[in-house]
C-alpha cells in the first residue's frame, strides 16, 4: 500500500543523496498523523466553542481528580506558563462559567481554581469526541499491531527523554 509520503520520500531521495528514506518516511508520517489529530481536535473544540488553551486548562483541573481544583501556581506549573498569563486564562474561563475561584477556608491568602459543573460538562463532551477520533484512527490497526506500535513509540519517546 502506498501513501502520499511515499511520493515525498521519492522526490527528496533524488535530491538529497544522504537521505535515509526509511527515517524520512517515519518522521514525515509522524508529522502527518500529528497534523491529522490536531486538525480533528481543533474541529471538535470548535463545536464546543473552545480554544485549545481553554480546553487544556480545564483538562489540567480535571486531571487532579475530584473536587477538580488547583491553585493558580500549580496550574501555571502544569501548563508551563507564568502565573500572570494564567490569571488572564482563569479570568476568561470564569467569565464563561467554566471555572470559579475561591479562597482557602484556613488560609485566605491561598486561592483555588475549581472546575464548575458547566466546565466539567464541556470538558467531558469534548474529551469524549477527541478520544473517539483517536480510537477510530488507531483501530485501523490490528490489536497486535497496536501493541507493537505502542512499544516502538515508547522506545523513541524514552530516547528523547534521555537525551533531553
Image (spheres, rainbow, N blue to C red):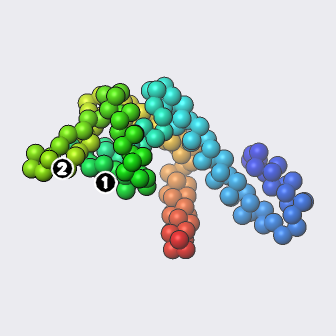
Q: Nearer the viewer, residue 5 or 76?
A: 76
Find residue 53 and report its horizontal and vertical position in percent.
46, 41
Find residue 140 and report its horizontal and vertical position in percent.
57, 43
Q: Is residue 3 left or right of residue 99?
A: right
Task: Give the mark nearer the N terminus: 2 vs 1.
Answer: 1
Q: Is residue 23 left or right of residue 132?
A: right
Determine whether label 2 and label 1 are within 8 Å by CB: no
Residue at 55 percent across and 58 percent down: it is: 149
Residue at 66 percent across and 47 percent down: it is: 32
Cα gap from disc 2 to disc 1, whole angstroms? 15 Å
Find residue 120 and report its horizontal and vertical position in percent.
30, 34
Q: Nearer the viewer, residue 37 or 105?
A: 105
The crowd level at tag 2 (other Cα within 10 Å; few <14, some 14-19, many 20+) is: few
Q: Which residue is mark 2?
A: 109
Q: Which residue is mark 1?
A: 74
Residue at 55 percent across and 74 percent down: it is: 163
Residue 96 sits above or below residue 105 on the image: above
Residue 158 sits above or below residue 86 on the image: below
Choose top left, top right, bottom left or bottom right for residue 48.
Answer: top left
Q: Is residue 2 left or right of residue 81?
A: right
Q: Nearer the viewer, residue 70 or 29?
A: 70
Amino acid at each position: 500500500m502506498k501513501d502520499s509520503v511515499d511520493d515525498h520520500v521519492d522526490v527528496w531521495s533524488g535530491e538529497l543523496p544522504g537521505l535515509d528514506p526509511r527515517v524520512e518516511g517515519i518522521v514525515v508520517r509522524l508529522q502527518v498523523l500529528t497534523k491529522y489529530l490536531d486538525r480533528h481536535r481543533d474541529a471538535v473544540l470548535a463545536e464546543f466553542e473552545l480554544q485549545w488553551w481553554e480546553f487544556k486548562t480545564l483538562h489540567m483541573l480535571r486531571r487532579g481528580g475530584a473536587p477538580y481544583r488547583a491553585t493558580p501556581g500549580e496550574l501555571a506549573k502544569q501548563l508551563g506558563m507564568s502565573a500572570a498569563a494564567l490569571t488572564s486564562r482563569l479570568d476568561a474561563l470564569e467569565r464563561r462559567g467554566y471555572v470559579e475561584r475561591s479562597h482557602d477556608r484556613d488560609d485566605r491568602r491561598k486561592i483555588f481554581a475549581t472546575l464548575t459543573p458547566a466546565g466539567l460538562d464541556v470538558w467531558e463532551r469534548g474529551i469524549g469526541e477527541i478520544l473517539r477520533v483517536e480510537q477510530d484512527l488507531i483501530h485501523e490497526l490490528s490489536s497486535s499491531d497496536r501493541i507493537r506500535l505502542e512499544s516502538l513509540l515508547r522506545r523513541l519517546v524514552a530516547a528523547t527523554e534521555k537525551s533531553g
